[in-house]
Amino acid sequence: MASLESLIQKCNSLSHVKQLQAHFITTSQLLFCSSRTKLLELCAVSPFGDLSYATHLFRHIQNPSTNDWNAVVRGLAAGPEPTRAISWYRTMSRQSCRVDALTCSFALKACARALARSEAMQIHSQVVRLGFYADVLLMTTLLDAYAKSGDLDGAKKVFDEMVVRDIASWNALIAGLAQGSRPSEAIELFNGMRVEGWKPDEITVLGALSACSQLGALKEGEKVHSYIMGEKLDMNVQVCNAVIDMYAKCGFANKAYTVFKNMCCRSLVTWNTMIMAFAMHGDGYKALELFEQMGQAGVHPDAVSYLGALCACNHAGLVNDGVRLFDSMAGSGLTPNVKHYGSVVDLLGRAGRLKEAYDIVSSMPMKSDEVLWQTLLGACKTYGNVEMAEIASRKLVEMGSKSCGDFVLLSNVYAAHERWKDVDRVRTAMKDRDVKKIPGFSYIEVDGVIHKFVNGDQNHFNWREIYAKLDEIKFRTKAYGYVAETNYVLHDIGQEEKENALCYHSEKLAVAFGLISTAEGTPIQVIKNLRICGDCHVVIKIISKIYNREIVVRDRARFHRFTEGLCSCKDYW
DNA sequence: CTAGGGTTAG
């Protein structure tokens, strides 16, 4: 029977497996347990595998071994419905067959993929009961499951309590913190591990770079980059891609491009990242040029490349180029997804071509989502189209939107037409639903230290001086002819209070702090988690003029470079 | 060799 093992190994399609299976049945040959498991594994986890066939095979096994169970749990965990792996795991725990560390590992992998936090906790307690707490690989998987399912404190706790740690344990926590919107802690941990004598690898730096990108932490990012060069980790394409992204998101498209040019082998993601980088900076033509070049270099643009190019057209106001690109997708064998539709709706909407934008949304082959209608609503606000704004709002309410911004936009459309009764109606509706307001915050890096501000923040050690600076700004911008656009403010408060509500937006606080804590004439860079507010955009333009400073604001969507009273977005955003 | 950590996106 020596050939049996080799026969199984030679299987490279499901039909081979089925043939073997049929052969065993017809010849009434008894399969050795190990061979049977191999066959099962092949069905469950190999690229040509078939999960339903694997479970079918499994059900014909009289006394499945732990390994048989593991094969199925593993396959299900990696498949399209990871929660099924968790139910199989539960069934298995109830049977006499023993759960081993691998079973737990596969089940936890499923929790990570299914974002199943409480299930991860249940498996955690089993892991402890079974005495697997010293297994580094398993504990790292557990840590990762907590992090991915959104319980970063749980992940940290597992990390702290680990008896043994290795590089992957550090990596899992660093990446978890970076992806879970706690980038400062990710960087702290990255620096901490180096102090403890650990040597970050490719995966560690990917996490650290992602954290720097989010924070716009240029100094930290540069430190990571020089570490990468020192350790020759730049042989890894993914690492280089992350470096490009980091420089781009820290405001230095040119540095990103230098890294791009020096790379010997670029992947599809490399091109996409660079196209997106130019798009974010409003360099529409450079992005489109790159999009052309990648095709010439033999790299076929994928859906993300198209999205980047569309986004570039969007931010550069290249309306017709964008529409043409969108229409050309099908010819390249690509089906536009909801994000492509979102981008082109934005493109048309900003250009005032509301009817076309609306027609696209209503004739989409897939379900429209909230973002799409929000985009259209934003365009309606810009062009004062009440009828369409009402349609979009109704859709958003139907979809259960509780976003404050949606109500504010509609109310602004009414306010612009002095339809105060309608304004009141919207405000009442807002109070009736418990509307969510995502807190806005801004970062600024000064001397390598990141300072974070929220709206109306008085927690900064220097807040009195910052507020004094803002009073000065208020005075000087008014003298310059600025009038607060209080339409953006929704609260039922007096005019002066409304002005104050605008005055202490997080981006203004960060800019004011930048003005007082950096040398005259040096550029100031701020990062905001949401889109920059209209009033802040106006005020920062004036600040750039009267204080003679270049001010760069990265918002959720793009970079705004303010110089001499103008913005690089040409007020088209 | 039945395990863990990973880059781009309206």
Image: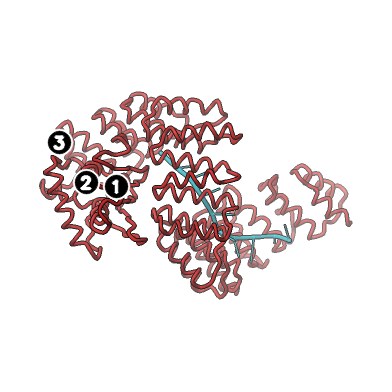
Q: Earlier in the sequence, mark 2 or mark 3?
A: 3
Q: Quadrant of the N terminus of chain A?
A: bottom right
Query: Pointer 2: what residue?
Result: A543
Residue A86 in sight in this render: no
Residue type beneath disc 3: Lys
* Identity of the residue drawn at 29% across and 39% down: A567
Residue type beneath disc 1: Ile
Q: Secondary structure at mark 2?
A: helix
Badge 1 density bin: few <14, some 14–19, many ≥20, Cα 10 Å: many
Mark identifier at residue A421: 3
* Pair 2/3: label in front: 2
A387 vs A214: above or below? above
Give the quarter of the image for residue A418.
top left
* Identity of the residue drawn at 83% across and 49% down: A25
Q: Quadrant of the C terminus of chain A?
A: top left
Residue type beneath disc 2: Ile
Dots 2 and 1: beta carbons under 8 Å?
A: yes
Mark identifier at residue A551: 1
